[in-house]
């Protein structure tokens, strides 16, 4: 059996931890699917623009191997792992994914979409229209998913976080607030409620505080299980002072951004950036 990509997806999520667990949680982050030229795909796209949603079949191109069981982000009560075929895990015998995205418009061989959970550069294998009459079964049973603990939590920004985030948005393509919303809105990061196995998350359950890593930045927050609320407190650099010396290697090409962030390009009445490594 031979399957060849018909195009690629391009969007904001570069690293695996950037991608939301469900595309609908990533609304407001448009991406695009660019189909290959010379394949008569212009004709294949005819009449698609009248559909609000489309199914995108794609390849998990950054994953190797598969696992027979997986640990869901929000596991059901009394279970730590579930079978891969009963999950949306990206580690599968055949690395094929399926996502229902919102179609914004079609221009030539480019499909502009939103609410996608694909990584930048993902190979697209096929596109099909979403048909509510045939594809929607709102009353269907959802197995262990119905046993998941917790509803969505409220995620709020403090004044300090808001000012720092606004500066970063103005000087880069990073969106720490949306990332925190996606990662923390399920409240799954304490011993009983949250997924403490996530490697980019550190939690102090006694203080009800935590630090979430977003690329080379760190998001500090506090949470209340009683109120089911997370407050984003401030942003710090993940680099140490030694890391930010002028002659230090700049693997990700963002150290000048961190230097500017730390040494005074933010100026508000309420906040200034914390030092590197805080």
Image (cartoon, helix red, strand yellow):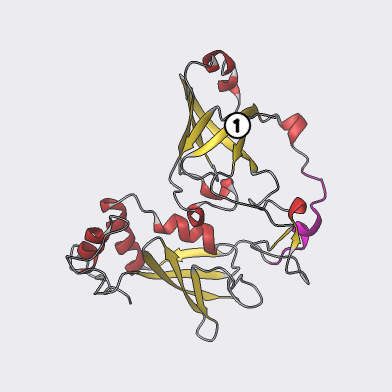
Q: Quadrant of the N terminus?
A: top right
Regarding mark 1 in the picture, which secondary structure is present there? Answer: strand
For the point 76% across and 30% down, the residue is 133
Q: Is residue 169 magenta?
A: no
* Residue that numbered label 1 is attached to: 125
Q: Is residue 155 above or below residue 3?
A: below
Say whether residue 266 is visible. no
For the point 79% across and 59% down, the residue is 144
Of 253 and 231, which appears nearest the observer? Answer: 253
Image quarter for residue 265? bottom left
Residue 116 image offset from top left, x and y in percent: 54, 42
Residue 164 image offset from top left, x and y in percent: 30, 63
Q: Quadrant of the C terminus?
A: bottom left
Q: Which residues are magenta?
A: 138-149
Give the class, few, some or many, for how many residues have Cα within 10 Å of label 1's Cα (few <14, many ≥20): some
Residue furthest front in the image: 1
Say whether residue 185 is visible. yes
Q: Is residue 143 magenta?
A: yes
Q: Is residue 276 above or below residue 32?
A: below
Image quarter for residue 214? bottom left
């Amino acid at each position: 059996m031979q399957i060849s990509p018909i195009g690629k997806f391009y969007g904001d999520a570069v690293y695996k931890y950037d991608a939301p667990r469900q595309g609908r949680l990533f609304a407001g982050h448009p991406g695009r699917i660019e189909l290959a030229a010379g394949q008569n795909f212009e004709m294949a796209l005819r009449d698609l623009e009248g559909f609000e949603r489309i199914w995108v079949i794609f390849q998990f191109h950054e994953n190797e191997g598969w696992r027979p069981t997986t640990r869901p982000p929000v596991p059901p009560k009394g279970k730590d792992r579930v079978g891969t075929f009963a999950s949306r895990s990206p580690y599968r015998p055949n690395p094929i994914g399926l996502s229902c995205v919102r179609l914004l418009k079609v221009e030539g061989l480019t499909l502009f979409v939103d609410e996608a959970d694909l990584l930048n550069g993902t190979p697209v294998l096929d596109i099909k229209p979403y048909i509510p009459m045939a594809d929607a079964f709102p009353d269907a049973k959802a197995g262990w998913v119905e046993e998941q603990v917790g509803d969505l939590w409220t995620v709020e920004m403090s004044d300090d976080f808001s000012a720092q985030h606004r500066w970063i948005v103005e000087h880069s393509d990073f969106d720490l607030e949306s990332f925190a919303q996606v990662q923390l809105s399920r409240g799954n990061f304490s011993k009983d409620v949250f997924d403490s196995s996530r490697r980019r998350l550190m939690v102090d359950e006694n203080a009800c505080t935590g630090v979430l890593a977003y690329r080379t930045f760190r998001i500090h927050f506090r949470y209340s299980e009683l109120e089911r609320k997370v407050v984003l407190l401030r942003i710090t650099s993940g680099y140490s002072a030694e890391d930010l010396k002028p002659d230090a290697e700049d693997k990700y090409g963002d150290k000048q951004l961190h230097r500017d962030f730390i040494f005074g390009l933010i100026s508000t009445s309420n906040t200034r950036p914390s030092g590197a490594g805080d």
